[in-house]
Image: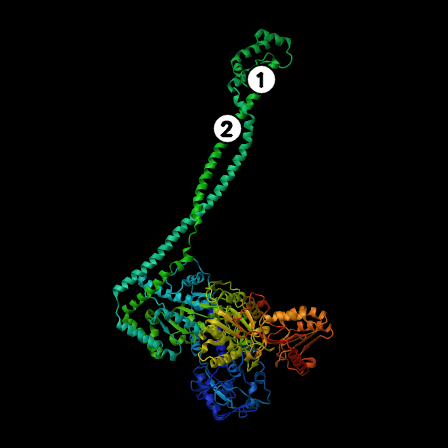
Amino acid sequence: MNAGSKVDKILNAWFDYIALDDYSNARIEANSDKVKQRGVKLVRDHVLIEAATFSELQKKVNQRQKFQQEAAWVLSFPQVLDVEEGKSYLCPLFSLDLTSILKGEYQEQGWNLDSLTLIEAGDNLATFLKLDDEQCEKLITKDGLRRFLETTFGLTFNSYQDWMERIIIPRRSRDPIQRQPYLFEFTGGRFTGNLRQDLKDIKLGSKNWSKRHPASEYLFGVPNSAKDEVIYMGAFPTHAPTNSQSTALKHAQSEPITVVQGPPGSGKTTLILHVIAQQVVNRALSLIETGKNINNLTVVSSTNNKAVDNVIEKLDKFLKNELFYLKGGNKGNIQSSSGAIQQLRQAIEFLQKNSFDEKLYNSLKQSIKAIKVEILAEESKYLELRHQRDLDEKLHQHLSEKIQTLQKHLDEILAAITPFQRGARALSEYNQLPIQAYRTIEKYFNKAESLLSEGKLTWWVRLWRWLTGKTEERILRDVNSVCQSAIAQTSGTSFPIEPPSTRADLIQQARLVRERIDKADELKNIQQILEKKYNDRDKTKQQNDDAFKEFQILEVSLATPLEDFYTSFHQNFHDKHQELFKLSWQFLIQQALYSKDRGKQTLELYSSVLSGYRKDKDRMAENLDEHIKYLSLIFPVITTTLPSVRNMLPWVEECVDRTIVDEAGMIDQHKTFPLLVRSRKAIIVGDPLQIEPIINLSQQRRDNYRQTAFLGRGLTEIDYHRYSPEEEYSATTYHRAAGASGEDNDQGHGIFLKEHYRCQPSIIQYCNAITNYDLEIKTEPVNSLLDSHLIAYDVEGNIHNNANEEEVTAVCEIIQHLVKQGYSLEDIGVISPFNVHAAVLKERLKNKFPKLDSKSVGTIHTFQGSEKRVIILSTKVCRPQDNVYWINKRPNLLNVAVSRAKELFILVGNLYKLEKGNLTRQLVEHIREHGVVLEYKSEAEIPKAEPGNILIYNCEHLQIFREAIEQVEEELIIVTPWIRGNESKRFVNDVVSALERGVKVTVIYGNKGSEENDYNDAVLEKNLRDLFSRYSGSRFSRLGEGIHIESRGTNARILICDTKLAVIGSWNWLSHPYRKQCSRASLNIKPQIRQETSIKLSELSSIEDVKASISRLITS
């Protein structure tokens, strides 16, 4: 499959998804001509349409088909109305497509609804039925309309007409629900028109993008790794880029798409501002250095309004009402008094009132050039130093190796010298040998010896020698005569030679001479070798010393590290980069004044385009690149949400130099694609470990979409995981831009921002733990006004209309307490994972605190991109059917929730229930370890003190309880709502001593409430029941079961020890969370809304009254 064909298939799949999403939140103006209420009836299971109505609608369908216009006619019932800005809208809870019927023959008997295709409206169902995201996922849609209505609305019925007439749906307006069917023409959702048109234009276009075009890279590419040795010019007047931000900025200098993973508090907005600044500087430098006037238009966008607003707020803080960016949005906002059209008029007026200042222009040019030259000179200087350092390091290594070699050679020489020195010492006496005399003696002794035959001579030889004078005596006399002088030289030495007197004597003396000469020669030879080796030693040592001196010099030089220019210039030259941006912006303003006439034409034309004049849109398109150049000269930035991009840039062609998309991890991938098609380069910023896109489709609807939109079109399973908008864990804008494979847990290749500057360490450490971020926490320490950065309030909870009423009450009291401690309402944010609960919180808190900004209360999703000094997370879950898995299935929700808090994070919920989930258990344990865990007690749970009462507070209960177990003699009675947690485990061991002493121990428990499961620990219950069964007279009774099945339980907390004392109050004797905190130096009571309080009774009559009340509790 070629790329173009695959793109078409992907686009078609996206169109299918948009249609599903549009149906999910469909709203149709009730008085619109697209709605048909008359001529339509529901009779049992059939829809009947009057012939005239059918004919009218059939003509409309055929006409649309003729002009290739997409629309569907669908049926829904009953008529559920909502009012918005004075207009009534029909909000279908489901849709049944009738388009194919209207293309066929008329049937007087009508059409059976079971033959029609069902599409549920997830958003509308969630709104009117108060369903949460988890409940929407579980909607049953694949088994047809009847099963869908039965399971969703909990109502069995005989016919669809019967269901319509009986169903009760909560109203959101005064308009009553009309129990009638209606037809409506659906051409798409209110907020997807621009997106659908953009994708249509792309599908009809050539799609011949180059390999490095952002659109192609987005669909099929994988980002390249960042390079270190890159520099950039310009920085926004804010904090210097961090090291990881600098890495992202370097990557963006050359790559078509830069993907940045920005965990909470890592400075994503700061990064975006620096990118904007560099866009301005790059254009100024292009004009100065090449004379080329380039398009530097930067579009900042997201589906998250807060993400875009964060950038606008920072720009406004610096610019102080200067012209710099155009604020986009819907057409109403664009045309408003503060909208983009008005901004364009202000720009035109500015150009008219001001003139080009050539002197200033040239001055700015020189200043800009000077700063760049300075930075480049520093880079060049660094490169020279680094080159020299590289040479020095190589020489250093060479010298190190050379020294080792020389030392080794020196050691070898010294080792070799030793035996020769020993030999020389052994032969040293032969230095005194008169060698020349000895050699003379040797010469003549050898000659004489050769003349003297060995053995006995024959007579005639002796005769011959006598006749010739060669007798032994003559030979010896002659040799002594010739050697006399030499022999004389040996006398007085250690090596004297005696003149030989006999042949034997000669032979002996000759041998002695030879031996001594050999020894002298050996000594001389050794001395020659030693001399050579000494020379070698001295030479090697000198070389070694010279090398070591040079090595030491280099060592000192290299000991001072050379600061890496490329890893430090973003901080060392931040002032220069800021100045460069400011000068460049002034320079571009002068450039705009220089070409003011041409600029005014563009601004006027663009203003007309934004006003909706189609002809001017086409006129501008004829020379779009030039117009965008002049537009971006004075407005280098456009800010807009992704759904509104087409309102600001109605041309689906390359016209944006740099796109910046923030919060990409929560953006459906198809929503970003049209902007990338318009762009040359893009930076995609987000975090796949924060909030994902909200998908209000049932799991069954997703399965059907996968089959029809992907597999049915010849795309593969992996294509589905890569390109499906409803694959929120593997195919968001972030995943797609990062080149994620679609495989489980593959987040692609993003540049990670690792420095964290928002939360106090104990807060963000939890996020670190559940995400494996490994952040470098740079936050400045700040003390909480409650002396803890982490607090958990244990609230049992009770659910009414899908909201936890007790948690709502607790949150109200917590906020009151925070304000008393010194926090303002502006400091506090309240969030919940669940829509309905969040809506109830918002309503109740606005009534309680009128000055509280409504934006300070919402779902976790609405707080992405926000932060508060204090965040209160109300979790809602408390019933058996409240599945904590939905909060715990991924770390994203809790990561965002906790990391919104800068100074204080407060968890509100049923901690026992929350500890059933992995991530929520970790959160409770983290707060227990690093913060404060408290039981929320309502005012009714705190006993009223009367004169003479002895009050017990907080940790004092532990001592009372311990002393009661240790000192009880006859009877110990404990009444408590719950058996669970570490206190119950401890009690199993502690109570044995009392039981062994024969004490009658009675434990009565069971929480007063309407729930079947009161969250007692079954294992601990069994252990205590087994223990008590072994001791007669002791009793372990659970209210609400067995013989007490009729009892609704108790909220009482009572301790009775014999007739010595009775303690009544708020303390949960066998389930409280305080022991660890009480073991510390002191319990932090600042977070307590109300102290744990009990009344200690000592009078016998009062104790008997308490016993009587307990007896009634058991027997009632």
Determine the residue positioned at 60% across, 16% down: 507
Q: Residue furthest top?
A: 467
Residue 620 image position (x, y, % from top left):
33, 74
Q: Nearer the viewer, residue 899 or 42?
A: 899
Does residue 913 show up?
yes
Type of the residue with mark 2: Gln
Q: Would you say 965 lies left or right of 671 here? A: right
Q: Of callouts 1 and 2, which one flags the residue occurring earlier in the amino acid sequence?
A: 1
Residue 1093 image position (x, y, % from top left):
58, 75
Q: Which of 22 and 834 is in front in this view?
A: 834
The residues tagged by marks 1 and 2 sit, at their Cα atoms, a distance apart of 27 Å
Write down the quadrant of residue 825 in the picture. bottom left
- Mark 2 falls on what kind of element? helix
- Mark 1 falls on what kind of element? helix
Mark 1 highlights which residue?
510
Residue 565 image position (x, y, % from top left):
40, 56
Query: As displayed, is residue 3 above or below residue 523?
Result: below
Mark 2 highlights which residue?
528
Count residues near mark 2 (Cα–Cα under 10 Å), then give few for <14, some for 14-19, many for 20+.
few
Type of the residue with mark 1: Ala
Confirm or deny contact between disc 1 and disc 2 (CB under 8 A): no
Does residue 729 show up?
no
Q: Would you say 302 lies left or right of 729 here? A: left
